[in-house]
Amino acid sequence: MSAHAASSRLKVSGTCFFLQILTIILFAVFVRYSPDTSPGLRSAQLNCSSGRNPSSDSGFHHPRFRDVHLQTLIGFGFLMAFLSRYGTGSMAVNFLLVAFAIQWAILIQGFFYSFLNGKIYMEAQSMVSADFCAGAILISVGAVLGRVNPLQMLLMTLLEVILFTVNEYILLNLMGVSDSGGSLTVHTFGAYFGLTVSWILRQPHSDKRNQQQDMGHYPDVFAAVGTIYLWIFWPGFASATTVRTNAEPWAALNNYLALAASTLATFVISPLLHEEGVLQMTQVQDAAVAGMAMMGMAGEMLLTPFGALIAGFLAGLISPLGFKFLTPVLCSKLNIQDACGVHNVHGMPGILGALLGTLLTALASADAYGNRMELVFPHVADGSWTATYQAVCQLCALPVTLLLVVLGGSVVGAILKIKRLGSPPDTQYLENKTLREVSGERRERRASGEELGASTSV
């Protein structure tokens, strides 16, 4: 083990200890379970947290939480497990960041949404909201994976959770935007925050290896598992913060149809873009995620079944086209090394999803939505806003989000460039020596007859 790797592991260990003690202290001082026997307090809490889920009830819907949690841990996690010398380590990073982001998000979101009488009152919905935040963090990490060490990732998570909550609060509470599936708050925010940090961390004179092709024999297995989880659990993930009445779950239905269409689109476009004509499972996985990002805002709106199929099919075409034509331009012209292609999988589909949601909002009418209008567009239902004004708010949310991620990502990127947080030379990033011993080192040690001890993973 190199001296740099040993030093980095000690820094990660110390930082994790400090952050965990800090969160324990903050939880002890501020966080309490929401009392079920206090109607007045419950009402106040729901009013404070209405931005994320205005129609939530106080019951614990375990299937909804399970779907969100599995998508965060496995669906998003396996999106980062395709680099041959980094894949296994990226899964460890995934668990590290999720474990911290969930705790930190409960605190930060609690101060914005459920802070009352000097306390944060935690409920079941707090866990779902924290998982949504963790999902955005993992999307951002996908843009810088292999270029930053775990210590930098932890610091990035610490700051990004705060910015994520600020952006979400502005959009959902102050602007009254409807974005239950997170086209803007999760996909667009996470993608462009990560891309901004990646641009700030650019190294013009470094060895520009093509990270996308650094793949071993097992990435397709990871992608296959991740894709299966996307198919099973994403409709539940997308509808976790939407209507909880006897009404039909439009978000789940629309996302399910979009998922099927985006997957089929991969089999249409990929043979045309690649001479070898061999479809990789990672392409199917990326197209599926793109379809879900496209449906984030529009999912609970009146899109109609054929509209969901059209939207999903277009999203499935965008992802492979972006990888083929746009990613090389970003790398060569702007020196943005998008390790996991989050711009094609989350960024562009998220923006298109926001535009689609804006169009559907402008077309919304009481006759079409009926009683659901009060749940999807409460300001329009009570007559305080027109559908046109609501659509303008939906549209303005896009530049607001992009402005916040560019400013915030630039500041965070500048902080991560501090030398004391720095990583080894760029050619070593993909090996992830901080969290695990790479396979090449194992073979060399076996060849030299050295004894392999216990696992070196953190």
Image (cartoon, grey):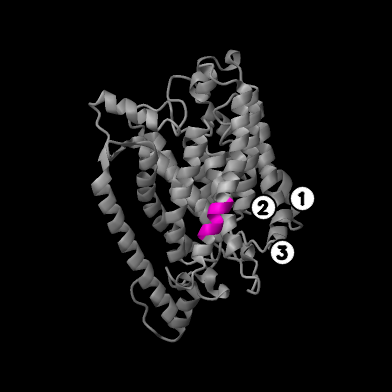
Q: Are marks 2 and 3 in contact (CB under 8 Å)?
A: no
Instruction: Give how far across and how far down residue 83 sits, in percent.
Output: 56, 63
Mark on residue 272? 1
Is disc 2 surrounded by few (<14), some (14 to 19) or many (20+) residues within 10 Å?
few
Instruction: Give how far across and how far down residue 233 sits, in percent.
Output: 48, 39
Mark 2: amino acid:
Leu
Mark 1: amino acid:
Leu
The residue at the point 36 percent across, 44 percent down is 106
Mark on residue 332? 3
Q: Quadrant of residue 451?
A: bottom left
Instruction: Give how far across and how far down residue 117 sits, in percent.
Output: 27, 36
Residue 423 in sight in this render: yes
Answer above or below: position of 82 versus 237: below
Which residue in the rendered view is the most extreme toward the bottom?
A: 448
Classify mark 1: helix, strand or loop. helix
Answer above or below: position of 265 versus 176: below
- Name the residue that disc number 2 marks: 279
Query: Which circle, 3 or 1, is nearer the viewer?
Result: 3
Classify mark 3: helix, strand or loop. helix
Q: Main secondary structure of the magenta part?
A: helix
Residue 305 in sight in this render: no
Q: Which residues are magenta?
A: 406-412
User: Which quadrant, please, contains the C terminus?
Assistant: bottom left
In 3D space, how far apart are the residues under numbered discs 1 and 2 (Cα atoms)? 11 Å
Q: Earlier in the sequence, mark 2 or mark 3?
A: 2
Instruction: Give how far across and how far down residue 310 sits, in percent.
Output: 68, 33
Q: Earlier in the sequence, mark 1 or mark 2?
A: 1
Q: Quadrant of residue 305?
A: top right
